[in-house]
Amino acid sequence: MACGPKKKGMACEKKSLARWMLEKKLADADVSEEEQNNILKDLEKKETEYMRLRRHKMGVDDFELLTIIGRGAFGEVRLCREKATSNVYAMKKLKKSEMLRRGQVEHVRAERNLLAEVDSAYIVKLYCSFQDDEFLYLVMEYLPGGDMMTLLMRKDTLTEDESSFYVAETILAIESIHKHNYIHRDIKPDNLLLDRTGHLKLSDFGLCKPLDSSSFPNLTELDNAAGNITNTSADGDKPLSSTAVPRRTQQEQLLHWQKNRRMLAYSTVGTPDYIAPEVLLKKGYGMECDWWSLGAIMYEMLVGYPPFYSEDPMSTCRKIVNWRSHLKFPEEARLSPEAKDLINKLLCNVDQRLGMKGAHEIKAHPWFRSVEWEKLYQMEAAFIPEVIDELDTQNFENFEEEACTEWWQSGGKM
């Protein structure tokens, strides 16, 4: 695809560089010539599609809206098909009045900017964005493999080999946005999507923060939650709640977690289970908060529920702040010493947290000794989802149109 010498020069240069880097990685990874050609053809197709959509002024009428595959505090995500080409995408539809009411406009702008700036194989690709009087629309690639939350609910736990594969791919995704000076701030299983081959990409950058923006607004809902948990007890390490919670077995805790998980995922409050203590306490934070979230996800993959799960979100926040008293490994989970060590080095104080100097610190941990980092995305994935065709949504939760309309009209508070 030819590019003009001036206006498109930079885009062409970026495209050529991306292709050259991918060719080099494929050669180094010892991938067969046929596989290399297939991967490069797929890249070229996506790049061509990206340039075409950027040139054409798009609107919602250019798309046929299909199944709802997700919803959140400000809108929904829907499978859609472009009428002119029949290409399939995921369309994120955000209600502007709700974003304004909650002061979230800058967060959405940051999401769009990050997706436009960061050209990475490890994050969901944004093809175009547009708006009308009521809504903002983000048109992104559709990954039919579902999300990590759904996979974990289906399988309860993953083996250490399966977990190391997906934790490793998550590290590459987080590293790719950190290199562009963004913090994600919302790393959780719901935002780890799987493509049709089972490889992972990071999504949902609505809470991302550029590090060079000191005036960037705080997380309103997180700050409200944090304001209620900063009064710790006299010794600082005991939980604030005086209510005794009965001790459950790993299986009982797993069932309890799964019963409440989807409700928390789609509520306006969400789940705080993956949020770092420094974020909750408003002490100031950097990229290290994303590595705490990674540790919480790794724990959930191996144990079945997050490390600080409690009866309600506020109790979870208290446990996170007092993590020393609450980080425990159930004996039934039978984690390896290396797995426990890595989790302990991620779920700890910022100044001791692995990854503080960069992702290379985490990659070098013994738990990843069998991971071939350069070949990871060319290998067969740990889990290959069942995908019938490009419109298949079986790996996402079913959302009834009528129920979604009622939920929308209630402001997402049902």
Image (tube, rainbow, N blue to C red):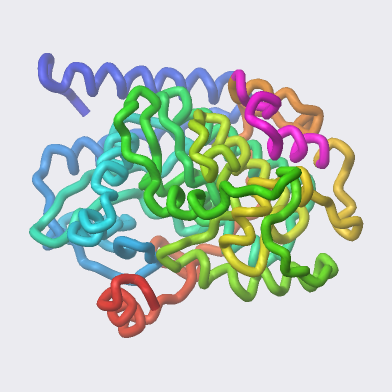
Residue, x 38% and y 54% (percent of image)? 142
Residue, x 68% and y 53% (percent of image)? 319
Answer left or right for 20 relative to 352.
Answer: left
Residue 219 against residue 410 in the figure, above or below: above
Q: Position of residue 203 (x, y in %)?
A: 43, 47
Residue 269 against residue 136 in the figure, above or below: below
Give 267 or 129, whichever is nearer the viewer. 267
Residue, x 37% and y 74% (percent of image)? 413
Q: Is residue 300 found inside the magenta-colored segment of the image?
A: no
The quadrant in which residue 406 appears is bottom left
The quadrant in which residue 26 appears is top right
Residue lying farthest to the bottom in this orientation? 402
Residue, x 10% and y 57% (percent of image)? 132
- Residue interval drawn in magenta: 340-357
Q: Position of residue 35 (x, y in %)?
A: 53, 35
Answer left or right for 208 relative to 28.
Answer: left
Q: How many marks?
A: 0
Res. 226 visible in picture: yes
Q: Is residue 352 found inside the magenta-colored segment of the image?
A: yes
Q: Position of residue 196 (x, y in %)?
A: 51, 54
Q: Position of residue 318 (x, y in %)?
A: 64, 54
Give 402 or 20, whichever is nearer the viewer. 402
Answer left or right for 384 relative to 24.
Answer: right
